């Protein structure tokens, strides 16, 4: 037996029965299964932030180890993660939630799943590259975005992997997402149309990994459990989709034709998921329409924002940037910048001074967050409702009026002006079986 605090890794064994000398120990017996052709030559086991070797020599599928746990872990569910390695690289992963029993042995089997290799995508998924469409295909066992296919003249604009006669915003300007563990993408206007799209993948530095759109030496969990979320016109699942030790949203699986994604699931109908922009931890998420349906959703994290209304601080900015006007901006340290060189003008309030209450200094200058529709209740909190004109009253987003041919009959701001008028313009009600006056 060899001890690796706070765990001890016992010799390979099987079953939940205790052996002599183990009567007063809290033990997990973990069996690991995987496909032999993957070429796994070592295993690692992880609990929390700590990882230990779980095999000596190349293991076979069904390899079993016993872990001695601290008694304090008994009685509460814990995640047991196992990694399969080949040549020192993590290529497979599995996790199970187990509740240890004090001074007893619990057996669990953890099947490994092969991590995707190649590009960060789902087979047969599509995405835009400028005004062209690329498809995720499997080549030599790994996934890759194939050669680009230009959009035709009768549908010249590409959004969310589809060519159409009009474009939609895929994201909020400046938002960033990870493209696998070692790369990231930023939202901007990167093609010939007027909509915002995800730009090309950019690599992280060699010693860094990507979490929530930011490259850093240490990763951070983006999500937990088996959550699902909408990503464009598809769904993403929380889990292990790359080789770092943290959990992240996997690549999006597109919804089938005729369906859209709402609240983490594909459906023929959509629902508004937000009415104003929100804080997600220390970062800001914009509320808007980022797909082809008519409902509102939150964007990917706007990770360059050091939003003080979200608890952001100056040291949240990357090296070479400082926090000004609630945004991280570059420091101008060029030789001709002069002795008073400072941040660029991007994101700095035009007056540069303090704002007296009830005014608040935001990137647009001094604004009244009690009534400003673009800064309602806080800087950057943009109000928006489906089929409606939004307003801001007492720091809350409200519906000021409905768009033509729509009405708000349920007095529920979350779904906007939800009722499509059968007749427009409205007329006096007649007995024709139709709602002529839209009420």
Image (cartoon, rainbow, N blue to C red):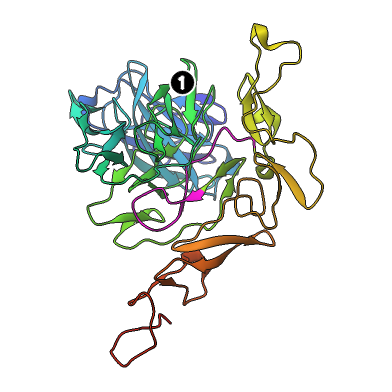
Residue 21 visible from this viewpoint: no
Judge from the rendering whether residue 364 lies leftward or rightward of residue 434; answer left or right: right
**Which of the 4 image quadrants contains residue 151?**
top left
Q: Is disc 1 placed on a helix, strand or loop?
A: loop
Q: Position of residue 90 (x, y in %)?
A: 36, 24
* Membership of 302 in magenta stretch: yes
Q: Which residue is mark 1?
A: 204
* Membership of 52 in magenta stretch: no
Q: Position of residue 121 (x, y in %)?
A: 30, 34
Judge from the rendering whether residue 328 lies leftward or rightward of residue 197; answer left or right: right
Q: Position of residue 386 (x, y in %)?
A: 45, 61
- Looking at the image, which is closer to me, 96 or 134? 134
Q: Position of residue 16 (x, y in %)?
A: 39, 43
Question: Compared to 260, does 19 lie above or below?
Answer: above
Q: Which residues are magenta?
A: 287-306
The residue positioned 76% from the left and 49% from the top of the image is 359
- Looking at the image, which is closer to me, 238 or 94? 238
Task: Pick the quarter of the image with the C terminus.
Answer: bottom left
Question: Crowding near pointer 1: few (<14 within 10 Å), some, many (20+)?
Answer: some
Question: Compared to 423, does 371 lie above or below?
Answer: above
**Which of the 4 image quadrants contains residue 131?**
top left
The residue positioned 40% from the left and 44% from the top of the image is 169
Question: Compared to 29, does 214 lie above or below?
Answer: above
- Looking at the image, which is closer to me, 18 or 153? 153
- Looking at the image, which is closer to me, 272 or 375? 375
Judge from the rendering whether residue 153 lies leftward or rightward of residue 28; answer left or right: left
């Amino acid at each position: 037996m060899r001890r690796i605090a706070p765990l001890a890794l016992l010799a390979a064994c099987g079953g939940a029965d205790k052996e002599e000398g183990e009567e007063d120990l809290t033990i997990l017996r973990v069996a690991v299964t995987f496909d032999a052709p993957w070429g796994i030559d070592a295993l690692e086991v992880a609990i929390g932030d700590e990882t230990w070797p779980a095999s000596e020599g190349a293991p076979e599928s069904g390899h079993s180890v016993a872990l001695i746990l601290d008694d304090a872990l008994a009685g509460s569910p814990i995640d047991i993660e196992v990694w399969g390695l080949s040549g020192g690289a993590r290529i497979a992963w599995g996790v199970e939630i187990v509740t240890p029993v004090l001074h007893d042995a619990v057996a669990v089997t953890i099947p490994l799943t092969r991590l995707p290799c190649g590009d960060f995508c789902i087979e047969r998924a599509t995405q835009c590259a400028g005004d062209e469409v690329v498809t995720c295909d499997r080549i030599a066992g790994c996934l890759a975005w194939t050669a680009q296919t230009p959009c035709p003249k009768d549908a010249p604009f590409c959004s969310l992997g589809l060519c159409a006669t009009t474009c939609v915003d895929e994201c909020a300007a400046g938002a960033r997402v990870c493209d696998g563990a070692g790369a990231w993408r930023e939202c901007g206007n990167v093609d010939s149309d007027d909509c915002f799209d995800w730009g090309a993948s950019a690599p992280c530095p060699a010693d860094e990994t990507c979490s929530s759109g930011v490259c850093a030496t240490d990763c951070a969990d983006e999500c937990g459990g088996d959550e699902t979320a909408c990503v464009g016109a598809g769904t993403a699942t929380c889990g292990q989709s790359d080789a770092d030790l943290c959990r992240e949203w996997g690549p999006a699986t597109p919804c089938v034709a005729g369906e859209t994604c709402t609240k983490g699931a594909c459906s023929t109908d959509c629902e508004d998921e937000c009415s104003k922009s929100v804080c997600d931890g220390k970062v800001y998420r914009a509320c808007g329409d980022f797909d082809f349906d008519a409902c509102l959703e939150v964007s990917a994290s706007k990770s360059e924002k050091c939003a003080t209304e979200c608890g952001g601080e100056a040291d949240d900015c990357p090296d070479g940037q400082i926090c000004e006007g609630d945004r991280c901006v570059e420091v101008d340290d060029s030789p001709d910048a002069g002795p008073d060189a400072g941040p660029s003008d991007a994101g700095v309030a035009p007056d540069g001074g303090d704002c007296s209450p009830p005014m608040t200094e935001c990137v647009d200058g001094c604004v009244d967050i009690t009534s400003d529709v673009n800064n309602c209740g806080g800087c950057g909190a943009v109000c928006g409702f489906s089929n409606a004109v939004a307003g801001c009253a007492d720091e809350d987003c409200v519906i000021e009026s409905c768009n033509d041919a729509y009405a708000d009959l349920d007095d529920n701001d979350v779904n906007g002006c939800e009722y499509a008028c059968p007749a427009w313009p409205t007329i006096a009600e007649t007995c024709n079986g139709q709602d002529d006056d839209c009420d």
